[in-house]
Image: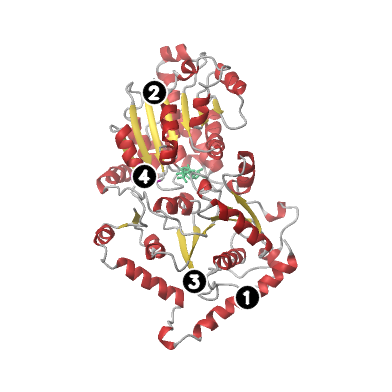
């Protein structure tokens, strides 16, 4: 980073930080408010939103539901539906109480202990507890796990609630029970060239992420896992399937491609052994743009027993599609579905107020500066994800952050190749790197004065719990600017700050983007930048999060 430029910016920023409040105090007395302008404005906005002017919305609010935006949003889930899950959760809180094979339980606890962001390495593996969705799914599906007829379930739970393990429990339990409890069937298939189960996801990033969890669990259980992504050749697949693939992770497109090439002989036979199919990020996979491909891919598995649709949101459109195509499905939903975790500190900054003068870019650079300086994540490289609505803006924002403000920044959109995308997200999906391990520590804060504690004209006070020590002054911040493409399903590892540069257009986008932090009940901060055009329903979100309201 260009030190001099940064130093100049820092001086400017500090001046702006101080001037923000001075400027405000020069305003006419009638407009002065002791709590600070933005807070006042925010409360006004909330009051406006809560006025029962729009009767539909007011009624929804009475039920604890907040209608965000004017586009077709999230389905309102009836209390009766989540009540069933709540009842199960009252009775069960341990893995030991779940009806699964002990070896599957131990393997999955082991995997959770190795990959979870919510546990420290000293944690005793056997004391790891299942998350609510893991309890609900296991108990519900276990009852009919080995039944022969087709069973269709939708699983829906909030972002970062452990849904991958939730569907892996019945899947792996099923595969191992076939081996252990039906030796005649197992003898017939164990040496056959077949695929036994498939997990479908929309992107190659997710193929990689889900495969990591699947391959770890499969190795512990003596199962063969295989991922088919952009680098996998048809010969790789043929070699793997010869030895039986127990779990395959791929995209619907890859499944359909097997029917288009000569090199794969009779793919219908290879897929005739598929008994268990999971669609992860099902609302995306069943979206208009994917539906045809996804549906055709499912149809290539004629003997499937379990079909699971898993997602963090149930958009109205998805629900209608499912009613049409799979009317007999059963739903498993958690009470917190469509809520933003209360562990997330949701902050608003209004770019239309001084000193930003309408510049969202200025706001963004100041948030990044404040994040850099807040004294958290001491000794580790900080990482921050910025979401924009349009892909054309990702590059623009990146360039400005780099050239004008000297931030260490990359942008990622669908225009990058899959390899580039995987490379760019690598730093963000892995645990934060200790600063000592980095060759050249970016010692940005050593160049700047230690003064910034709040952002002007916002409801933001950067909570610095301890004084910043000399070692904490060594800081480094990596910034990823991206679009909704990276908002679904990706388990950004321990990312504590997400910035919504643009106000998300729908509640669906809002829930997914905010959900890249605060995963598995860990803390996190979401900063949303608003401006003159931003509707009052968006400005009400911090209050909605604090009061634990459901979004629709
Ligand atoms: N029982 C558990 N205890 C603690 N951590 C867990 C548990 N189960 C899963 N995790 C961890 O929680 C994190 C989030 O899990 P996962 O990615 O499956 O969430 P998700 O619900 O699929 O999120 P999204 O909706 O964003 O796709 C992972 O780091 C995972 O290792």
Residue 229 % position (x, y): 57, 32
Residue under label 1: 14
| Mark nearer the N terminus (3 vs 4) | 4
Q: Secondary structure at mark 1?
A: helix
Tag 3–tag 4 contact (CB < 8 Å): no
Density class for disc 2 (Cα within 10 Å; few <14, some 14-19, many ≥20) is: many
Q: CA distance from mark 1 to mark 3?
A: 19 Å
- Which residues, given as a range, are shown in magenta? 313-317
Residue at position x 72%, y 58% in the image: 441
> Which badge, 2 or 4, comes first in the chain's sequence?
2
Q: Main secondary structure of the magenta part?
A: loop
Chain-order first, disc 1 or disc 3: 1
Q: Are marks 1 and 4 in contact (CB under 8 Å)?
A: no
Query: Which disc number belongs to residue 74?
Result: none
For the point 26% across and 66% down, the residue is: 53
Where is residue 256? Give x, y as percent.
49, 26
Q: Earlier in the sequence, mark 1 or mark 2?
A: 1
Q: Is residue 389 left or right of residue 100?
A: right
From the Cβ of disc 2, is ligand 1 less than 8 Å away? no
Residue 508's place in the image compared with 470, above or below, is above
Picture coordinates of residue 415, whole percent (x, y): 59, 44
Residue occupied by mark 4: 314
Residue with the mark numbered 3: 352
Pointer 3 local density, CA inside 10 Å: few below 14, some 14–19, many at least 20: some
């Amino acid at each position: 980073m260009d030190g001099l430029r940064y130093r100049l910016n820092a001086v400017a920023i500090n001046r702006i930080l101080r001037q923000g409040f001075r400027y405000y105090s020069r305003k006419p007395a009638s407009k002065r408010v002791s709590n600070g302008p933005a807070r006042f404005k925010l409360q006004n906005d909330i009051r406006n939103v809560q006025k029962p002017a729009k009767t539909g919305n007011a009624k929804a609010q009475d039920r604890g539901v907040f209608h965000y935006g004017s586009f077709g949003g999230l389905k309102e889930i009836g209390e009766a539906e989540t009540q069933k899950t709540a009842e199960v959760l009252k009775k069960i809180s341990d893995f030991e109480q779940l009806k699964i094979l002990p070896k599957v339980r131990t393997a999955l606890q082991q995997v959770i202990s190795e990959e979870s962001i919510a546990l420290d390495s000293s944690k005793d593996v056997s004391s790891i507890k299942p998350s609510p969705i893991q309890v609900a799914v296991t108990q519900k599906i276990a009852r009919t796990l080995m039944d022969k007829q087709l069973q269709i379930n939708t699983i829906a739970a909030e972002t970062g609630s452990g849904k991958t393990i939730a569907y892996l429990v019945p899947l792996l339990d099923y595969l191992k029970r076939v081996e252990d409890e039906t030796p005649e069937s197992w003898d017939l298939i164990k040496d056959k060239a077949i695929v036994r189960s498939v997990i479908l996801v929309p992107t190659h990033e997710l193929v990689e992420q889900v495969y990591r969890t699947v391959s770890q669990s499969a190795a512990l259980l003596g199962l063969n896992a295989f991922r088919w992504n952009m680098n996998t050749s048809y010969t790789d697949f043929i070699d793997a399937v010869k030895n039986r693939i127990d779990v395959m992770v791929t995209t619907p497109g890859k499944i359909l491609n097997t029917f288009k090439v000569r090199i794969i002989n009779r793919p219908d036979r290879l897929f005739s052994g598929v008994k268990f199919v999971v669609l992860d990020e099902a609302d995306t996979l069943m979206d208009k743009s994917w539906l045809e491909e996804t549906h055709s891919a499912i149809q290539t598995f004629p003997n499937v027993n379990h079909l699971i649709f898993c997602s963090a949101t149930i958009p109205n459109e998805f629900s209608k599609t499912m009613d049409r195509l799979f009317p007999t499905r059963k739903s498993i939903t958690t009470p917190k579905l469509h809520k933003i975790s209360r562990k997330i500190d949701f902050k608003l900054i209004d770019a239309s107020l001084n000193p930003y003068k309408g510049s969202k870019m200025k706001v963004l650079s100041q948030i990044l500066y404040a994040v850099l300086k807040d004294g958290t994540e001491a000794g580790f490289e900080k990482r921050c994800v910025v979401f924009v609505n349009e892909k054309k803006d990702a590059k623009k924002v990146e360039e400005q952050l780099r050239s004008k403000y000297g931030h260490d920044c990359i942008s990622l959109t669908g225009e990058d190749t899959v390899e580039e995308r995987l490379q760019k997200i690598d730093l963000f999906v892995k645990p934060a790197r200790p600063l000592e391990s980095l060759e050249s520590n970016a010692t940005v804060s050593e160049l700047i004065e230690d003064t910034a504690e709040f952002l002007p004209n916002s409801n933001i006070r950067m909570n610095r719990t301890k004084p910043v020590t000399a070692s904490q002054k060594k800081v480094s911040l990596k910034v990823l600017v991206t679009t909704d493409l990276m908002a679904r399903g990706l388990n950004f590892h321990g990312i504590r700050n997400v910035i919504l540069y643009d106000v998300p257009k729908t509640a669906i986008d809002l829930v997914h983007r905010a959900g890249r932090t605060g995963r598995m009940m860990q803390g996190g901060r979401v900063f949303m930048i608003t401006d003159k055009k931003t509707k009052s329903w968006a400005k009400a979100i911090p209050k909605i999060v604090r009061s634990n309201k459901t979004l629709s």
